[in-house]
Image: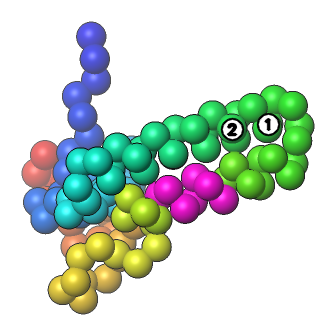
Amino acid sequence: MTKPPPPTTPDGRYLVVDGRLWRRSNPALGPRQRELLVAALMRARADVGRAKRTKDAALERRARDRVHRAKVGLGERGAPWWTDGTPDLNRRLVQNTPYAAWVQDL
């Protein structure tokens, strides 16, 4: 049986995983752009694993840099993709955010 997807905040900005907020990808990305960025992210993650297995610190650093660039491109890191001035709560415990009451009602 597959696990259900994690809940998404009502404003669509975050997923809640193990009580922590994780910023979602920018919904304004086009399908092709998203596809290319996700493919780059998966290749970079695979290279991180390969570098760790071979204990190649330089390769690991380069691969981690590529992971970061892909995540910034997707909108999961870097400046928030929304423009209303609401602060970014990425990686915060949901119980310590304005979403606390919402998550208790799930």
**Residue 14 appears anywhere in the view:** no
Q: Which residue corresponds to mark 2? A: 47
Residue 26: image quadrant is: bottom left
Question: Which x, y percent locates residue 2?
Answer: 28, 17
Q: Which residues are magenta?
A: 65-71
Percent across and percent down for residue 54 are 87, 31
At 57% from the left and 38% from the top, the residue drawn is: 43
Secondary structure under the numbered disc 1 in the rendered image: helix
In the rendered view, tell whether residue 66 sits above or below residue 54: below
Is 12 one of the magenta-colored residues?
A: no
Going by the numbered disc 1, the residue's amino acid type is Lys
Residue 50: quadrant of the picture: top right
Residue 67 is a magenta residue: yes
Mark 1 or mark 2: which comes first in sequence? 2
Q: Tell me the residue at 61%/44% (across/down).
A: 44
Q: Quadrant of residue 61?
A: bottom right
Q: Position of residue 12 (x, y in %)?
A: 17, 59
Q: Position of residue 80 (x, y in %)?
A: 34, 75
| In the image, farthest residue toward the bottom | 85
Per the picture, the main secondary structure of the magenta-coloured stretch is helix
Please name whichever residue, 88 or 62, is drawn nearer the observer in this view of the structure: 62
**Closer-to-camera residue (3/103):** 3
Residue shown at the point (47%, 58%) measured from the top left: 71
Callout 2 amino acid = Asp
Residue shown at 20% from the left, 63% from the top: 28
Colouring chosen for the image of the structure: rainbow
Q: Secondary structure at mark 2?
A: helix
* Residue placed most toward the observer, 10 or 44: 44
In the displayed structure image, the side of residue 52 where residue 76 appears, left or right = left
Out of 18 and 13, give the one closest to the viewer. 13
* Residue 52 circle label: 1
Q: Rate crowding at label 1 as few (under 14), some (14 to 19) or many (20 or more) other CA atoms within 10 Å.
A: few
